[in-house]
Amino acid sequence: MRRFVIGMIAGIGFCLITFSAWAEIFGPQAVWTAPEDLDSRCREASNPGQCVETVMRSTGASIQALAIAKKCDFTCSLTEIGREGRVVSGTRSDLLFFSHNSDKPVLLNGQPDFIDVWSQVPKDQVSQILRPFKGAIAGFSPPSLLRAQSKPSGGQTFTYESEVKQCRACPVEAHILLDYDFDATGKFLGANARLAR
């Protein structure tokens, strides 16, 4: 009987570990829409991030939403989330000190569980691609999600598109494609850049 109980406990423990490894980390509950007066309420606060956290809690923000905001010191929130598979796409928006690039793409639920797409751009590859476009850059606006694909191996690839321009108001000269690869366990394998043909 004792062996049976120990075996049952071990089996339950294994199932819990397996489930937790595959369980969704961030879902629709992670999305939080800021009240219209948030910027005016918190911009001049002695601790803007703490002010945002207080507002989030007082408006019933979920644990997931608070966890996302904590990753950027309560200066951003998740405003969109996809349903592509184990790893999902999302959009994080700046809550204070808005800029032209307030909305930024992120990838969630992989390893790591929160990836800022723009911060993982392979800069050396992008520099090589930009050489023929004298003076042009690919950073006037955040990259946009073009497609998400599942691999036969069980992994995923998210392809983003970035515009190549001389200035913010200038015409688009080309597009750079950015591939973000994950294996079947959700581990981030890296990003690669290529010129769109």
Image (cartoon, rainbow, N blue to C red):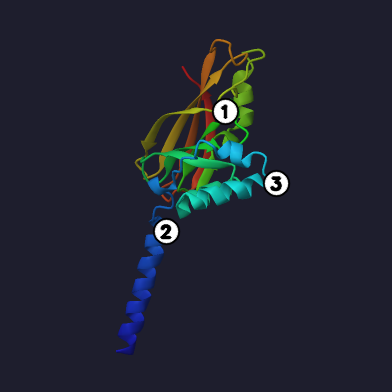
10 Å neighbourhood of mark 3: few (<14), some, or many (≥20)?
Answer: few
SS state under label 3: loop
In the rendered image, the quadrant that contains the N terminus is bottom left
Q: Position of residue 8 (x, y in %)?
A: 32, 78
Left/right of residue 104 with respect to residue 145 in the rendered view: right
Tag 1: amino acid: Asn
Q: Residue at x 62, y 42 (%)?
A: 42
* In contact (CB < 8 Å): disc 2 and disc 1: no
Decide if residue 95 is on the left or right side of residue 145.
right
Separation of marks 2 and 1 at Cα, in angstroms: 34 Å
Q: Earlier in the sequence, mark 3 or mark 1?
A: 3
Total numbered circles: 3
Q: Tell me if mark 1 has few (under 14), some (14-19) or many (20+) residues whose alpha carbon lies within 10 angstroms of its own.
A: few
> Residue placed at 33% from the left, 89% from the top?
2
**Residue that numbered label 3 is attached to:** 46
- Bin the neighbour count of mark 2 within 10 Å (Cα to Cα): few under 14, some 14-19, many 20 and up: few
Marks 2 and 1, the one that precedes in the sequence: 2
CA distance for labels 3 and 1: 25 Å
CB contact under 8 Å: marks 2 and 3 = no
Residue 31 appears anywhere in the view: yes
Q: Which residue is mark 1?
A: 101
**Label 1 element class:** loop
Amino acid identity at mark 3: Ser
Identified at 48% across, 19% down, the residue is 196
Q: Is residue 9 depicted above or below 193 in this figure? A: below
- Return the x and y of residue 103 as percentages of the image width and height: 52, 32
User: Where residue 54 appears, x then y in whole percent?
Assistant: 56, 51
Work out which residue is located at the far bottom of the displayed protein and give it: 1
Numbered tag placed on residue 21 in the rendering = 2
**Residue 111, can we see it?**
no
